[in-house]
Image: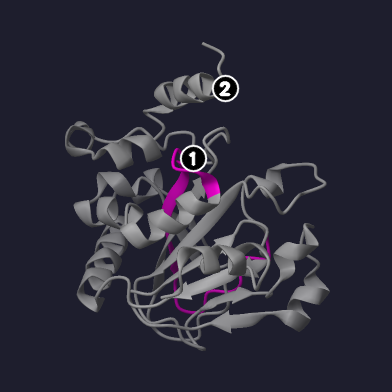
Amino acid sequence: MPATSAIIDQLIDGPGFVLMPNLIDASEAAQARSRALEVAASPSAAAFGKLNEKIGQQHIRGLLAHGEIFERLVQHPAIIEIAEAMLGDDMTLGAYSARILYPRATEMGVHIDYPYWAMRGPFTLRPPLMTQVIWMLQDFTEENGATLVAPRSQLRCARPNREDFAREAIKITGTAGDAIISHGLLWHDTSQNHTSDPRVALLINYGLKVIRPLDSEIAKVPADVLARATPKLRQLLGLEFGNSLARDLKRGGLY
C-alpha cells in the first residue's frame, strides 16, 4: 500500500479516491454482511432504516448496537491513519451505516457527501471537511451495483452535473475485504444491481470534529458497547469533544 502522504495526495489533488485492497479477510467481510442482512430482516428493521422501494435500496443505521465486528471496522488502523491525516487526530464519526442494494436496485443518484451537500457553497478543496469509506462486504462487480465515481471531480468543488457524471463515471470493482476511501467532494453513485443477490457495503463518514454529525444519534450506543469502547471509539463518538477543545485552547495560548 502506498505511503499515507501519497494516498492523501491522491484523495485531494488526484483522482479523489483510493481503493485499498485486502484490509480484512473474506470471512470477516462475510460476517459483517450476514449481520447487516439479519438486522435488515428483523422485525425492528424500520427503526434502523426503511427500505426505499423506489430504488430498491435500504440504509441500516445504528450498527454499533449490532455486533463487535462493526466496532472493529470503524476503527481499522489503516483507515484511521489515513482519515486522521486528512482531518486531524481528533476527528469524529459523522455517520455509520450499511447500504443494501437488493436485486434490481437502481442508482441512488449522483451526489457529494455531507456536509458539502448541506452547505450553500462555494466549496473549497482544502481543508477537507470529511472523508468517506466504503467497505466492500462482498465482491463489487460490474453487475451487482459497484460504486460509480467521476475521477478528479472533487477538483471542481461543485455540486454534481448529471451529464458530466454520466460521461466520466467509472465503476470501482473489487473483492470482499477491500475498502474505498474518498474525498467528500467526489461525485459518486451506486450502480444497478443486475444479480439475484443483495449487494451490501458499509458506509463510514469521518469528519472534522467541529462538523455536526449527519446522524444526530451517532453516540447513542448500548451501555455494554460504551463500557468496552476504546479511547479511539470514544473520540469517534464525540465523547471526548470537550477534552479536545481544551487542548486546542492550550495550544492557542488562551489559558
Q: Nearer the viewer, residue 241 or 212?
A: 241
Q: Residue furthest top?
A: 255
Residue drawn where x is 71% and y is 71% of the image: 152
Q: Residue furthest front?
A: 253
Q: Nearer the viewer, residue 56 or 187?
A: 187
Near mark 1 (Cα within 10 A), the count class, few <14, some 14-19 or many ≥20, is some
Decide: is 212 above or below 40: above
**Residue under label 2:** 252
* Residue range corresponding to the magenta coloring: 87-111
Tag 1's secondary structure?
loop
Residue 232 lies left or right of residue 151; in this view the side is left
Point out which mark residue 215 bears: 1
Q: Nearer the viewer, residue 170 or 123?
A: 123
Quarter of the picture holding the N terminus: bottom left
Residue drawn where x is 36% and y is 62% of the image: 78
Which badge, 1 or 2, comes first in the chain's sequence? 1
Percent of width and height locating residue 248: 51, 25
Q: Which amino acid type is marked by label 1? A: Asp
Residue drawn where x is 63% and y is 50% of the image: 128
Percent of width and height locating residue 73: 31, 58
Viewer-side label of 1, 2: 2
Percent of width and height locating residue 44: 31, 46
Residue drawn where x is 32% and y is 71% of the image: 23
